[in-house]
Image (cartoon, rainbow, N blue to C red):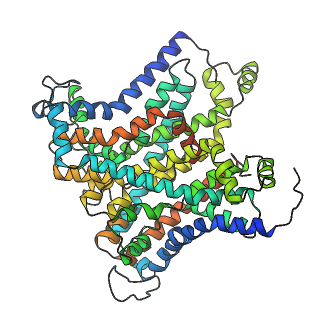
């Protein structure tokens, strides 16, 4: 891009960007601001970012005691962690074989992976629900985790990565008497860390934020993931006790926002690669 | 390097089958099977838990295409896309150009504009509900300061769908910005110098002669990706409007959800899923075509 320009141009550019930023970030700022205010200030039409009387302690205490917020977050960690771990166990060997081994049916399998990439997550929802109903697993961690164990995106991404690893490395390892599984674990995995991180970011963001599936399979409050928990909280409050409600949304949004701020580059890489798919 | 032994060797093949088998089983049981089953279910009158299931051919589809609510839902989904896609694509493009052209603060702007993409949409929908509150919501309070009566954003049937589309644009503009930035980085800088020598002096001229044509494939890709994403709108509808008022925000996935999981009309819900799937697959094929111009899967 051309980086020169007049001083006026620079000022205009930043003015527009900052104005846009205020609008984009207003929901976050107002959420935090409201979570610190007592009800009379929330219901006043006078605009102010900081409260006159701080009610942060009351609001956050209420948020944590009215609904099991920590439990929701823990569920989020269990579910996203479980999904990603199982996705790795299933995807990595398959991706390695697709990239580096010759066998009959390889092209068909890779075509299946490409087709899998195209199917939106909601399409298989009804039969998945029926299957879980038949085996009595609705309303359980398994119902939240198992349907997402196969990740076409994960296999595709890791295969593309393994393709870039030179064959000589494997030949040398084979001469040393290593089996394919050992080559995968000892040689490929350490090299694949960056690609696995990009995959992890996409997988975790997708499933932490997923709402459609948990809404369908979970009835018990104790099993709610963060988005579903937010809805329970909102319904409990009948949408009027805004201070604690906003405190709750701060707590629910914080983990991913912090993760994003800590690992921006990986996020942006992962997202560019995928156009955001789980 | 040319392999010494181009033929398959049995050991390698056995190892390969062992390595791919977990993925293969998971694919068949969790994705391919259910996706095909949805098509089969859509040809039956089955309701979850019912002891009998009859094949009724295209009966569900006939009922669907005769249903006013389905058409309302179908049209609403397209209207939603027709607002969100151009809105978020142009916003994303504008942001990418403005930020990439800045001399400082680029990382900061990028992160800040990207924030809505990663934040949990359900939690933010609850925040939006508060911002849009008719009397104490931030939006109407600010509008009041400049003398505009904001009114009700979510309960007004002629407005609710567009309010949701606004939230959709807010949420996805940052994603499109990032995708455009990748496209901008791929433009060789000497093209700009060449254009300047050829007399493209103004910023606009350089955009028109170099950036826009070079971004063509990226724009198509971003547009289709946005289309697929916004066609799947569900979260904000469930939290903010439940399809109301008076079906004004009824969208395809929401109709599918209520039919299949609230009323347990499984066969009928499956038929809606098939319609949804056909549209998404059509858009995806478009994306593949767009992607072929951009990348090659080696």
**Relative to B148, is A183 on the left or the right?**
right
* Rendering quarter of residue B289: bottom right
Residue A198: percent from the left, percent from the top?
56, 44
> From this viewpoint, is residue B170 visible?
no
Residue B132: percent from the left, percent from the top?
25, 40
Give the residue displayed 49% in from the left and 30% down from the top: B110
* Rendering quarter of residue A58: top left
Give the residue displayed 50% in from the left and 51% down from the top: B227
Q: Is residue B80 above or below residue B114?
A: below
**Relative to A242, is B93 on the left or the right?**
right
Outermost residue, front side: A177
In this orientation, which residue lies closer to the viewer: A16 or B45? Answer: B45
Residue B242: percent from the left, percent from the top?
27, 58
In this orientation, which residue lies closer to the viewer: A110 or A146? Answer: A146
In this orientation, which residue lies closer to the viewer: B160 or B119? Answer: B119
Outermost residue, left side: A40
**Relative to B131, is A183 on the left or the right?**
right
**Relative to B215, is B262 on the left or the right?**
left
Q: Is residue A93 above or below residue A267?
A: below
Give the residue displayed 36% in from the left and 46% down from the top: B121
The total of numbered circles placed on residues is: 0
Outermost residue, top side: A7
> From this viewpoint, is residue A204 visible?
yes
Give the residue displayed 29% in from the left and 69% down from the top: B262
Residue A178: percent from the left, percent from the top?
73, 56
* Rendering quarter of residue A211: bottom left
Q: Is residue B8 above or below residue B76?
A: below
């Amino acid at each position: 891009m051309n980086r020169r320009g007049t001083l006026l141009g620079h000022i205009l550019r930043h003015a527009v960007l900052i104005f846009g930023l205020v609008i984009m970030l207003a929901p976050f700022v107002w959420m935090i601001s409201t979570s610190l205010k007592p009800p009379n200030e929330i219901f006043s039409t006078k605009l102010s970012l900081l409260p006159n009387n701080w009610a942060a302690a009351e609001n956050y205490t209420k948020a944590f005691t009215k609904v099991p917020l920590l439990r929701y977050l823990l569920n989020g960690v269990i579910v996203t962690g479980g999904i990603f771990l199982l996705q790795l166990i299933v995807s990595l060997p398959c991706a390695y074989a697709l990239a580096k081994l010759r066998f009959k049916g390889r092209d068909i399998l890779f075509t299946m992976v490409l087709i899998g990439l195209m199917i939106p997550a909601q399409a298989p929802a009804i039969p998945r629900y029926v299957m879980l109903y038949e085996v009595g697993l609705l309303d359980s961690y398994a119902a939240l985790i198992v349907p997402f164990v196969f990740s076409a995106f994960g296999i595709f991404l890791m295969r593309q990565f393994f393709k870039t690893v030179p064959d000589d490395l494997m030949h040398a390892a084979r001469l040393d008497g290593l089996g394919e599984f050992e080559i995968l674990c000892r040689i490929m995995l350490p090299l694949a860390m960056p690609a696995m991180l990009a995959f992890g970011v996409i997988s975790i963001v997708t499933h932490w934020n997923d709402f459609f599936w948990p809404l369908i399979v979970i009835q018990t409050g104790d099993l709610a993931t963060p988005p579903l928990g937010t809805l329970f909280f909102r319904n409990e409050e009948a949408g009027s006790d805004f201070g604690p409600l906003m405190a709750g949304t701060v707590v629910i949004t914080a983990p991913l926002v912090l993760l994003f701020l800590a690992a921006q580059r990986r996020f942006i890489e992962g997202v560019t690669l995928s156009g955001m798919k789980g | 390097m040319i392999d010494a032994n181009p033929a398959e060797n049995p050991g390698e093949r056995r190892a390969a089958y062992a390595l791919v088998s977990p993925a293969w089983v998971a694919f068949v049981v969790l994705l391919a099977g259910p996706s095909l089953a949805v098509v089969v279910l859509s040809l039956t009158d089955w309701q979850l838990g019912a002891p009998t299931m009859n094949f009724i051919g295209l009966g569900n589809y006939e009922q669907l295409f005769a249903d006013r609510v389905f058409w309302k839902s179908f049209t609403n989904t397209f209207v939603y896309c027709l607002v969100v896609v151009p809105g978020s694509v142009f916003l994303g493009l504008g942001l990418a150009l403005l930020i990439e052209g800045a001399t400082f603060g680029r990382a900061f702007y990028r992160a800040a504009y990207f924030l809505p993409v990663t934040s949990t949409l359900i939690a933010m929908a609850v925040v939006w509900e508060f911002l849009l509150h008719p009397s104490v919501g931030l939006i109407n309070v600010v509008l009041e300061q400049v003398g505009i009566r904001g009114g009700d954003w979510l309960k007004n049937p002629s407005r609710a769908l567009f309010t949701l589309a606004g939230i959709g644009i807010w949420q996805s503009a940052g994603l499109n910005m990032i995708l455009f930035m990748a496209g901008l980085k791929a433009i060789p800088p000497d093209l700009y110098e060449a254009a300047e020598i050829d007399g493209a002096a103004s910023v606009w001229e350089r955009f028109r002669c170099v950036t826009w044509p070079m971004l063509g494939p990226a724009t198509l890709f971003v547009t289709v990706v946005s289309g697929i994403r916004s066609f799947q709108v569900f979260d904000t509808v469930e939290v903010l409007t439940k399809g109301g008022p008076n079906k004004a925000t009824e969208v395809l996935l929401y109709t599918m959800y209520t039919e299949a999981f609230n009323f347990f009309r499984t066969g009928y819900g499956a038929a809606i899923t098939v319609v949804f799937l056909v549209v998404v697959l059509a858009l995806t094929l478009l994306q593949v075509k767009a992607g072929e111009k951009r990348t090659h899967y080696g």
